[in-house]
């Protein structure tokens, strides 16, 4: 909740300072000025709605949000609409999703158009006509747009600066970090934070997922050159190859984006650990609630263990309440350089093959990265055949791979199934199937439960005892075991605990990790103490760092005890 009078964030419905009702954020909408030929963002509750701040003329409602269409995308639009190239050169063109506004008149492009379009022909037409394209009239429109929205710009800048200063004051300067993705939102956030704190030396962490647009990599290079005093760290997973992982556990889907942990959150966690060890830091993110339904449920400041992906972070979002139009207003008015992919028509510049990408984004990739797009399509068709789809081409063309759930059809799916038998000779003992031999790595999985004490076990049985970290009383007995039907197995017995089933459930989680770990790095991000590392094919928990909080074996924080359970589970 938000108090507009005091300009502070609150949890109460009434502000304790001024007594006014708080609001979630300020409701706004986009109006169109026919005289100025630009959109104007106005508060819904204002009494002067419908009057252009620049010319005083009457305006009409346009949409809930809007973005500028740069000359490069405008030329593409003309080709798609079968218009003469550069016909709209002197027009004011804006868009929201696939709906375009040409001098205020709406034109909607259906998904079927992007799906059926011949990328080769369009690419050729773009090349033939780009030399005659220019941005002179575009710049004129943007100048009018900035003037018409000057009041809004001043308001969002002032509010964001105060927010940044307030949150940063709770941390040491060196513990303030900017999450930099190369997208427009993180770019605006980085610029805001640097200006608000008057500090060009802040740490930036750029998560290179290995699936970035070439324009994103180029922009990150430019940004580093333009901010020589910033500490710019690149987080990259060099141990995994995206396509190889896809072949093993399947491509990421909308509800199964394993790529985020493996190629983004995990590598960023490693950089944070290298810089701050177990210190708590403040990270400014470019998260906006209007981006998606899931993000609308976030808090502007988040440090709850169940909500943040990296436990060492308190996450703050200065532009949380901003619209797309606010971000572009800020970047264009402040003269901030940004990712050139937006000029081509992309409205999001995350991973180029993300399952959340729509038909328009896929169409753009067919034009601007044809080789990668073709390689990805061929992989998806092969994957569809592998899992037994009768119509693999249709499965891919219709985007059905984006909606898949679990590991149906994949050999790897068997690794997440916890298979066990109750021991007939000992109470509270279970015999678990392992996918590989019992070894020191497996024993290390039990560090979160307490002190691992192999010296206390029966040496002839290779037994290992685990002691409760508080009482030093034995709670687990672990020993390799031979069991019919299991190539490799282990017997785990619980003792001296009030709830044997609860402890055995957590034991099962560690068995699942040992069997199914694909080095997704989720566990590294989850561990606030920085005790867990997954590298070189080994899962290691440092007993000197582990604080036995058991978050890594608690379903609340890690459903099923292992992220792979979600991605490989079968019905």
Image: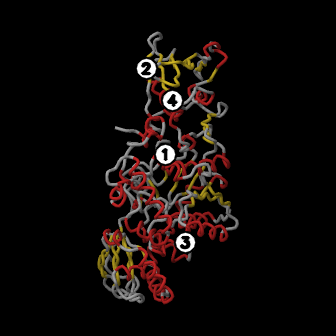
| Residue behind mark 1 | 248
Q: Nearer the viewer, residue 350 or 338?
A: 350
The reply to whether dot 4 and dot 1 touch (C-beta < 8 Å) is: no
Instruction: Work out how far the residue at label 2 is from the one at label 4, CA to CA, in angstroms.
Output: 14 Å
Give 287 or 182, whichever is nearer the viewer.
182
Nearest to the observer: residue 168 or residue 335: 335
Nearest-to-viewer mark from 1 and 3: 1
The structure residue drawn at horizontal position 43% and vertical position 32%, both measured from the top left corner, is 417
| Label disc, if present, on residue 511 of the rendered structure | 4
N-terminal of the two: label 4 or label 1? 1
Residue at image point 63% right, 28% down:
440
Query: Which residue in the structure is indicated by mark 2?
Result: 421
Is 541 displayed left or right of 416 in the figure?
Answer: right
Q: N-terminal of the two: label 1 or label 2? A: 1
Earlier residue among tags 3 and 4:
3
Q: Is residue 251 above or below residue 568?
A: below
Numbered badge on residue 58: none
* Number of other residues with Cα within 10 Å of mark 3, as a class: few under 14, some 14 to 19, many 20 or more: many
Q: In which quarter of the image is the C terminus?
A: top left
- For label 3, the residue is 338
Q: Earlier in the sequence, mark 2 or mark 4?
A: 2
**Are the residues tagged 1 and 3 within 8 Å (C-beta)?**
no
Q: How far apart are marks 1 and 3 (CA)?
A: 36 Å
For the N terminus, which image quadrant?
A: bottom left
């Amino acid at each position: 909740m938000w108090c507009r009078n005091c300009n502070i964030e609150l949890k109460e419905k009434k502000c304790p300072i001024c007594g006014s009702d708080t609001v979630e954020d300020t409701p706004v909408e986009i109006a169109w000025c026919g005289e100025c030929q630009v959109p104007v963002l106005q508060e819904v509750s204002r009494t002067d709605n419908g009057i252009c701040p620049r010319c005083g003329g009457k305006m009409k409602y346009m949409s809930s949000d809007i973005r500028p269409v740069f000359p490069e995308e405008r030329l593409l639009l003309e080709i798609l609409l079968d218009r003469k190239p550069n016909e709209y050169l002197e027009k004011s063109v804006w868009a929201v999703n696939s709906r375009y506004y040409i001098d205020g008149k709406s034109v909607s492009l259906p998904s079927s158009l992007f799906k059926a379009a011949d990328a080769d022909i369009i690419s050729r037409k773009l090349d033939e006509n780009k030399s005659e394209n220019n941005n002179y009239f575009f710049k004129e429109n943007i100048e009018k747009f900035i003037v018409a929205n000057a009041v809004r710009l001043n308001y969002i800048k002032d509010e964001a600066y105060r927010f940044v200063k307030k949150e940063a004051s709770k941390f040491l300067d060196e513990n303030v970090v900017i999450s930099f993705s190369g997208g427009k939102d993180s770019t605006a956030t980085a610029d805001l934070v640097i200006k608000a704190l008057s500090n060009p030396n802040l740490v930036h962490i750029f998560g290179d997922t290995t699936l970035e647009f070439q324009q994103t990599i180029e922009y990150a290079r430019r940004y580093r050159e333009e901010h020589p005093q910033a500490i710019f760290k690149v987080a990259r997973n060099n141990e995994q190859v995206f396509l190889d992982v896809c072949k093993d556990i399947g491509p990421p889907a909308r509800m199964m984006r394993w790529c985020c942990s493996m190629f983004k959150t995990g590598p960023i966690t490693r950089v944070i650990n290298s810089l701050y060890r177990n210190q708590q830091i403040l990270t400014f993110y470019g998260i906006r609630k209007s981006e998606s339904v899931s993000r609308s449920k976030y808090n502007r400041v988040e440090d709850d263990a169940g909500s943040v992906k990296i436990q060492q972070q308190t996450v703050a979002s200065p532009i949380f309440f901003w619209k797309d139009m606010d971000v572009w207003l800020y970047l264009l008015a402040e003269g901030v350089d940004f990712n050139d992919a937006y000029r081509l028509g992309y409205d999001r510049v995350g991973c180029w093959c993300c399952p959340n990408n729509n038909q328009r984004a896929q169409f753009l990739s067919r034009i601007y990265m044809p080789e990668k797009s073709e390689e990805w399509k061929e992989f998806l068709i092969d994957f569809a055949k592998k899992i037994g789809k009768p119509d693999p081409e249709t499965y891919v063309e219709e985007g059905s791979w984006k909606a898949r759930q679990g590991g149906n059809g994949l050999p790897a799916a068997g690794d997440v199934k916890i298979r066990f038998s109750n021991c007939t000779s000992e109470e509270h003992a279970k015999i678990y199937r392992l996918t590989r031999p019992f070894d020191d790595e497996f024993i290390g999985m039990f560090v979160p439960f307490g002190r691992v004490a192999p010296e206390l076990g029966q040496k002839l049985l290779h037994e290992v005892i685990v002691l409760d970290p508080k009482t030093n009383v034995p709670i687990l007995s672990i020993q390799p075991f031979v069991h019919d039907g299991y190539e490799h197995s282990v017997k785990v017995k619980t003792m001296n605990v009030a709830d044997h089933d609860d402890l055995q459930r957590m034991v099962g989680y560690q068995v699942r990790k040992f069997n199914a770990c694909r080095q997704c790095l989720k566990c590294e991000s989850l561990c606030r103490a920085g005790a867990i590392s997954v590298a070189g094919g080994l899962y290691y928990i440092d007993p000197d760092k582990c604080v036995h909080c058991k978050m890594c074996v608690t379903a609340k924080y890690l459903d099923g005890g292992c992220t792979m359970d979600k991605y490989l589970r079968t019905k």
